Amino acid sequence: MAVETWTQRLGRGAIAGSAGGAVSAVVLWLAVEPSITKAIDLENAAAEGHSHGDDGELISRTTQLIGGTVTSIVVGVLFGVVFAVVYARSQHRLAGFTDLGRSVSLAALAFSVVALLPALKVPANPPAVGDPGTVNDRTLTYLAIILFGLVLVGVSFAAAQAVRRRTERAELWWAAGICVAVVGGALILYLAPSGNVDIPATMPASLVWKFRIGSLGQHAAMWLGIALAYGALAHRRSLARQPSEAPATAAWAE
């Protein structure tokens, strides 16, 4: 049986990542972009009374949309490659009985750590919302939450393994890991500096939350796309390896 090379694994991850990035771009166009457009219109309307000239757009919205689409796909490919590396190293520890199930499990972990956990403390904001002077602090807080979230994943798996050495009941393994993850996640959110910003009176709160939910949905769509594509490709490879064992079995039967 041929041993799978890292080139094949990374290639599969890149393909899955491009699929996830494409799905993310679709969500960008359908769910996020309308909120951005409305926010920009409100910002321009509020600034009309203070304008002293026609400056015009430095970069057109069409160009920004194209750039956002390309960025979504590139980011998806990069995350897909990382996904392939982590999957290869940890698939035996992931929940699920198939390649697809394990891929979805890993994607759920990635989404929780990279998107959901930091978004609960530092939510995304549309244009005209937020103080530019706090961007660096918010970014550092966001990255710190991701870093501690990754550490928490490792600690949760270690806790599950510690319980596994003491009992054969699988439900207790997962209960230990989940409890550590929930308590640790709550502690991270409690200790992290607040990333909330004041919403201008001219900006409807419903629009801000629609943008935040759409942005989070974009992350979820990317990770789901990566999981489904990678799981399907991994399953296809597993099926392709099975016929190589059939001739030996048939010859023995004869």
Image (spheres, rainbow, N blue to C red):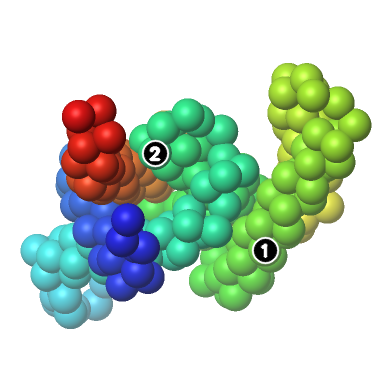
Q: Nearer the viewer, residue 140 or 12?
A: 12
Quadrant of the image containing the C terminus:
top left
How would you rate the neighbour count of disc 1 (Cα within 10 Å): few for under 14, some for 14-19, many for 20 or more?
some
Badge 2 local density, few (<14 within 10 Å), some, or many (20+)?
many
Direction right: furthest residue: 166
99 relative to 105 in the view: left or right: left
Quadrant of image for the N terminus: bottom left
Measure how far apart labels 1 and 2 are at the Cα level: 27 Å
* Residue 156 on image: x %, y %: 76, 44
Point out the residue furthest to the left here.
Answer: 62
Image location of residue 162, percent across then percent down: 86, 41
x 36%, y 63%: residue: 3
Going by the image, does 117 lie left or right of 38?
right
Q: Is mark 1 in CB contact (under 8 Å) with mark 2? A: no
Which callout, 1 or 2, points at the residue further toward the start of the chain? Answer: 2
Left or right of residue 233: residue 160? right
Q: Which residue is mark 2?
A: 99
Q: Nearer the viewer, residue 10 or 55?
A: 10
Residue occupied by mark 1: 147
Does dot 1 land on a helix, a strand or a loop? helix
Q: Amino acid at mark 1?
A: Leu
Q: Amino acid at mark 2?
A: Asp
Q: Quadrant of residue 253?
A: top left
Q: Which residue is depicted at the point 37% across and 35% down?
A: 100
The percent coordinates of residue 176 (x first, y second) are 81, 31
Q: Is residue 81 visible?
A: yes
Q: Residue at x 77, y 29 (%)?
A: 173
Residue at 77%, 55% (x, y): give it: 192
Q: Position of residue 249 (x, y in %)?
A: 27, 35
In this orientation, does residue 32 appear?
no
